[in-house]
Image: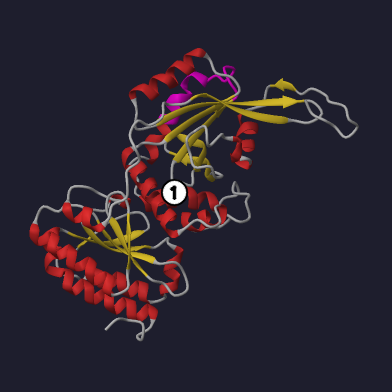
Amino acid sequence: MVRTADGSMPILIEALAANEQELQELMKSNPDLLPVEELGLAPAPLLVIGRETPVASGAVDLICLSKGGEILIIEFKTGPQNTDFRHAVAQLLDYGAQIYGLDYGEFEQAVPIQFFASKDCTDVQLMGKRSLDAAASVLWPGITAEEIAQMKETISNQLQSGGFWYVLAAQRFTNTIKNVIMYMNKIAPIARFFAIELVKFDGVISAYESRTIIKPEAMATKAASRLEEAKFLQQIVEAGYRSALEEFFDGCRGLHYETYWGTVGCSIRLPNPTRTPVSIAWVNPPDRSGWNGLRDVTLGLDWYDENIRGLGEYAQGYSEAVNSIAGAQVLERKGSFRGVHLSPPAFMQAFPAILELLRDLYGKVNGPTSAPS
């Protein structure tokens, strides 16, 4: 019922949406219609990062991102009257397969940056944004640098594992589709599958309601906890490598660099006088990859990080300098990241020179009087 200005209370009647585009446009303009808390996501607005995103097999109706970094792949159907309704879950999986395996930079360039530059992005605050960092800061005011780093790590981990959040939104679901979605939740615990009814009501006004019909069981395992330096070093079996890393961490602290610990490894961040700190190095254990699939010790820059502008000409100088480090292997990447990988033996030989490089970079960016002696 709706109370009108004259005091009457006309009843709104459930009605069919005209087509998929009506539902899609409604959700794109009002992503808060998705019941994020019922989906188990952070109680914050979703960030729309793609609409009709082109992939090899078609176009993804909607791609959203939660504040925690979960990627939602959303497909809209009006219901059983759709000729391809039976294939909707297969479409979702196919779309997920198209972004599975991308590194963070490739995903950022192919999906959100393309969307922010397109006519489909109608939010003036997001138009033309060149990074997810910048878009996140607009949509979620007050988000911290640590939260953004955790968001990026979660995105990167999902891209490597394929553990996306698949959402099928329709006005009605058949029992067959319900059974398929429940079955997928049973056999594919890394990914999560949801059925959301988006119901339209017509009358003196049009109104919409979303209902969560199917969702997976709550995760039985606890979220991975953040590391700290001591726990990380305990994982390093080779004594010489462990000692070199310990000296490296001590040296970075002495040079006033910041260390951000994630669930796998850490990033080393350069204080930036005009912007937030910039990640310039990453350290991960020998047997696991961290953000963007990086392994061991990596030096470099993510060139779509808008905070790099605060480094001025020194960003390019640093990028060129790391390429000349003895034993460093230049990484060939299609995304925005450029850098070098150092195996444990190479790092043990090169870390004193790396610390000198970081000392020089800090002094150039923050002023010679700020650089430690």
Q: In this view, does 135 lie above or below 351?
A: above
Colour option used:
secondary structure
Residue 355 screen position, x and y as percent: 22, 73
209, 86: nearer the viewer: 209
Determine whether, in the image, residue 353 is placed left or right of residue 12: left
Mark 1 burial class by Cα count in 10 Å: few <14, some 14-19, many 20+: some
Residue 13 screen position, x and y as percent: 75, 21
Determine whether, in the image, residue 343 is placed left or right of residue 253: left
Question: Of the residues shown, which amino acid type is indicated by label 1?
Answer: Ala
Identity of the residue drawn at 54% across and 45% down: 44
Quadrant of the rendered image containing residue 172: top right
Residue that extends furthest to the top in the rendered view of this protein: 175
| Number of residue marks | 1
Residue that extends furthest to the left in the rendered view of this protein: 239
Identity of the residue drawn at 34% across and 54% down: 334
The reply to whether residue 57 is in sight is no
Q: In which quarter of the image is the C terminus?
A: bottom left
State which region is magenta: 78-93
Q: What element carries label 1?
A: helix
34, 120: nearer the viewer: 34
Q: Is residue 310 above or below residue 287?
A: below
Quadrant of the rendered image containing residue 170: top right
Residue 304 screen position, x and y as percent: 42, 60
184, 260: nearer the viewer: 260
**Would residue 85 be counted in the magenta stretch?**
yes
Question: Pointer 1: what residue?
Answer: 110
Residue 337 screen position, x and y as percent: 34, 59
Q: In this view, does 139 lie above or below 240?
A: above
Q: In which quarter of the image is the N terminus?
A: top right
Identity of the residue drawn at 41% across and 57% down: 146
**Would residue 112 be counted in the magenta stretch?**
no
